[in-house]
Amino acid sequence: MELDNHAEDLASDLGVDKEEVKSDLQNLVEYSVPIDEAKQSLRRKYGDGSSGGSGTPSAKDVAEIDPDDGNVTVTGVVLTAGERSIRYQGDDHVIVEGRIADDTGVIDYTAWEDFGLEPGDTITAGNASVREWDGEPELNLGESTSLSFEETPLDVPYEIGGEAQLAELRTGDRAVTVEASVLECERRTIDGRDGETEILSGVFGDESGRLPFTNWEPTPEIEAGGSVRIENAYVKEFRGVPEVNVSTFSTVTELDRAIDVGADATSMAIGEAVRTGGIYDVEVVGNLIAVRDGSGLIQRCPECYRVTQKGQCRTHGEVDAVDDLRVKAILDDGTGTVTVVLDDELTQRVYGGTLEDALEQARDAMDQEVVADTIRERIVGREYRVRGHLTVDDYGANLDAETFEENDDDPVERATAFLEAVGASDETERTEVDA
Ligand SMILES: [Zn+2]
């Protein structure tokens, strides 16, 4: 009974679940911890810096923060601060996300309260809780965090603000600012969490590359052919590649100047590209070492477009399958392999014939595998330069090809480009060569 009262006091003080506090208290008391000690320890655990005497955690450098730290006190500069709405336990909350840095490093944070954080502010966050996100520590600034703004700005070796080029953006990035040309844009109706909603989706481009986007509340400034500056966007993975998310909290401004869109995709070694976890627009060069099963003349379900086996779709059962052409081929550059997927048009080019030609060849041979065999003879053992969308999942890396060209570069030039792509030549060496 007494324990119950203590638990209730603590729970209301700390704003946490009473049953959870009670079971923690029970544990400690069972280990003969005096009730006052036990309560103080729980205050530390649930992060109430204001009471319990020694409850305020010691100050730490950003680089020293470990996912297991519990609570820390940090002084740093707010690099970015972007608002976002999330649904938490059935309610919409506005949170602020971004990055904080001191001279030792940078850490992501989420602020659950409105502290009025602005990029450039130097702050001390007392009793910020640390949680692990994707293997990295992240700061949570909440009710129990005492936040103060420092008069003397801290000098940090990081850029304040979230200005970025599209090619630099990675899934999980928050509060980013991009200036981009709207290459494609369409209005779509989707089944959102609040029923049917209209959104815009398309592709942004800048000097560095291209990236798909979603605009959750269609903004008139975003239209095909225009160019825009977007502040406070975040990056989320969609269909295996990073996507720029433009929300109600983003600021969209029309630009009266054109943004040049680089004609070249980012060139990478295959191993390096696969390690990024997915890129919307990338170019790799490698040897085509095999054409996989399921290539050449294939049949697809008319409903879901999946490849059928003997007229059976895995989802729709017996269907009136539709003929199609595609290639799934393995490309290898010594640093890694990727499955290159060619659509019907690219497949027609490497096959040297149309779907009708393929059907005729298959009829004559009474075997549709002859189409894949013909393609194999034409492309296996040759070197190709492939540009497209790379997705990586548990089943491997797939490169959806937009272009697929036999590589006829000078081998010396190619070797140099390859070494640069894998980072083998450093800045000084290159300068000497150039001079
Ligand atoms: Zn189907």
Image: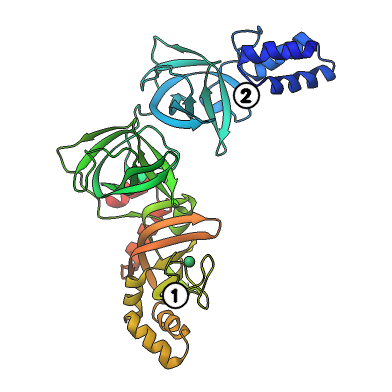
Circle number at residue 70: 2
Circle number at residue 178: none
Residue 275 percent across, percent down from the top left: 49, 51
Q: State which mark lies toward you, 1 or 2.
A: 1
Could you say which is closer to the camera, residue 315 or residue 377?
Answer: 315
Q: Residue furthest front?
A: 195
Disc on the earlier residue, 1 or 2: 2
The disc labelled 1 sits on which kind of residue?
Answer: Ala
Q: Where is 97 relative to 262, above or below?
A: above
Relative to 357, is 263 on the left or the right?
left
Q: Quadrant of residue 95?
A: top left
What residue is drawn where x is 44% and y is 28%?
A: 99
Q: Where is 432 relative to 1, above or below?
A: below
Residue 168 percent across, percent down from the top left: 37, 43
Residue 259 percent across, percent down from the top left: 20, 44
Q: Kindly tell me whether mark 2's CB lies below 8 Å from ligand 1.
A: no
Q: Residue 319: tell me if it is visible.
A: yes
Could you say which is closer to the camera, residue 56 or residue 191?
Answer: 191
What residue is drawn where x is 42% and y is 69%?
A: 302
CA distance for labels 1 and 2: 57 Å
Which residue is label 1 attached to?
A: 321
Could you say which is closer to the camera, residue 34 or residue 374?
Answer: 34
Q: Residue furthest left?
A: 256
Give the number of callouts. Answer: 2
Q: Residue 106: tell me if it is visible.
A: no
- Determine crowd level at label 2: few under 14, some 14-19, many 20+ residues with C-alpha closer than 10 A: some
- Determine crowd level at label 1: few under 14, some 14-19, many 20+ residues with C-alpha closer than 10 A: many
The disc labelled 2 sits on which kind of residue?
Answer: Gly
Q: Quadrant of residue 223?
A: top left
Secondary structure of the residue carrying numbered label 2 = loop
Residue 431 percent across, percent down from the top left: 31, 47
